[in-house]
Image (tube, grey):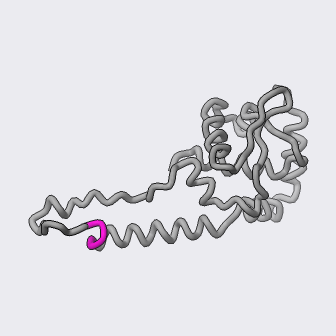
């Protein structure tokens, strides 16, 4: 996974703490973690295309959550940034080996491919079972001042 997934998830959590209707620009979100604005903006645009964020242009524009945090899974964010492909791609190298049998789909019969697909499915299920709201709640439990501190930081940022 590329770092854009981490950046996107942190941005989504930070957006949960903004007042209703408040949009935050890519530059402001990037400044929060000292990230490159152009690259973070690509991640935010991918989230907008996936219906996770909305994007508004203009002086009061920026990004905001398009759905309730309870309705955004970690898998939604990963898929928006990384795409829907499986992490492991069987290239059917058994076909090149001495035991090649014509007409065999080695993606289905290869024990390694099967194990990797099961692991990928378990990973996807775990991410699909957690939401941005779950992450938000855990952060708030561990750092109760995080929502207010984040709102204050954005309110006092001059960009």
Q: Is residue 33 above or below residue 143?
A: above
Q: Quadrant of residue 117?
A: bottom left
Q: Is residue 42 magenta?
A: no
Q: Is residue 104 above or below residue 10?
A: below
Residue 14 percent coordinates (x, y):
78, 48
Residue 54 percent coordinates (x, y):
74, 43
- At 70% from the left and 63% from the top, the residue drawn is 131
Q: In terms of secondary structure, what is the magenta stretch mainly? A: helix
State which region is magenta.
Answer: 106-110
Q: Is residue 38 above or below residue 110?
A: above
The C terminus, quarter of image: top right
Q: Quadrant of residue 125?
A: bottom right
**How many numbered circles does the render carry?**
0
- At 20% from the left and 69% from the top, the residue drawn is 104
Q: Is residue 10 left or right of residue 127?
A: right
- At 85% from the left and 38% from the top, the residue drawn is 154
Residue 129 percent coordinates (x, y):
64, 69
- At 64% from the left and 39% from the top, the residue drawn is 45
Closest to the observer, 100 or 15: 100
């Amino acid at each position: 996974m590329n770092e854009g997934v981490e950046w996107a998830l942190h941005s989504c959590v930070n957006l949960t703490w903004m007042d209703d209707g408040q949009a935050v620009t890519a530059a402001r979100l990037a400044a929060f973690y000292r990230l490159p604005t152009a690259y973070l903006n690509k991640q935010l645009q991918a989230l907008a295309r996936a219906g996770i964020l909305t994007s508004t242009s203009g002086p009061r524009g920026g990004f905001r959550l398009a759905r309730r945090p309870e309705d955004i899974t970690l898998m939604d964010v990963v898929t928006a940034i990384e795409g829907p492909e499986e992490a492991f791609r069987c290239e059917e190298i058994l076909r090149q080996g001495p035991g090649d049998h014509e007409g065999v789909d080695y993606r289905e019969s290869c024990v390694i491919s099967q194990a990797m697909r099961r692991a990928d499915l378990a990973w996807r299920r775990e991410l699909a079972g957690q939401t941005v709201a779950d992450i938000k709640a855990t952060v708030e439990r561990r750092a109760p001042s995080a929502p207010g501190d984040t709102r204050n930081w954005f309110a006092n940022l001059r960009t």
